[in-house]
Image (spheres, grey):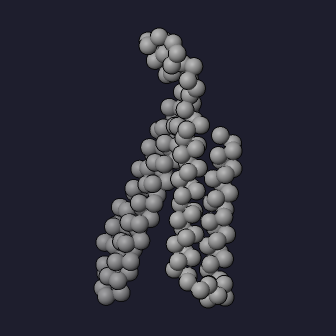
Amino acid sequence: MLVSIILMSSVIFATIALGVIFNNRKIFNRLTSPTKTGKKVLGTNMASLFGLITFALVTMFPSGHAFAQSASAAATSVAANINPGLGYIGAGLSTGLASMGAGIGVGIAGAAGIGAISEKPEMLGKTLIYVGLAEGVAIYGLIISIMIMGRI
């Protein structure tokens, strides 16, 4: 488990470092084909991250010794020995995916709101309501993750 966390953290830090490097105009202009380089880096990053997530999921399943017992005893033993790591993944996914969705919604509603406010300044209140509704999605994801963490 610790190994998968370290590997995923290194992939995330490498992604941040590459973003900072490619954001530099001097380095970006030296690339012969920035689009192809960006696609290669993104593809490698996504493949390694999904591979590491799969590795982490596989290592979190309970050991197979419970399945060698009888059916009723096995069900009781598996229910008692389930690793809480899957709960942590569920809590993280609920918060992370809800926050990404809220970010997309706030970006779209905010951009449209700025356009509306520039034409009619009295539209400020209505646009804030739409942005607030999009932000509510992140709060719902956080509430679900708190509920999951309460059951672990």
Residue 12 makes an appearance in the image: yes
Q: Residue at x 64, y 71 (%)?
A: 18
Nearer-the-camera pick, 15 or 116:
15
- The x, y position of residue 120, in whole percent, is 30, 85
Position of 111 compared to 4: left or right?
A: left
- The x, y position of residue 13, in whole percent, is 67, 62
To which quarter of the image does residue 88 belong?
top right
With respect to residue 17, does 11 lie above or below?
A: above
With respect to residue 124, does 58 lie above or below?
A: above
- The x, y position of residue 148, in whole percent, is 48, 38
Nearer-the-camera pick, 135 or 124:
135
Q: Quadrant of the C terminus?
A: top right
Q: Which residue is drawn at 43% across and 54% down?
A: 98
Residue 139 makes an appearance in the image: no
Position of 19 compared to 50: left or right?
A: right
With respect to residue 79, does 55 lie above or below?
A: below
Position of 114 compared to 47: left or right?
A: left
Nearer-the-camera pick, 120 or 68:
68
- The x, y position of residue 87, in whole percent, is 52, 37
Q: In which quarter of the image is the N terminus?
A: top right
Q: Which residue is drawn at 52% across and 15% down?
A: 68
How many marks the image carries: the answer is 0
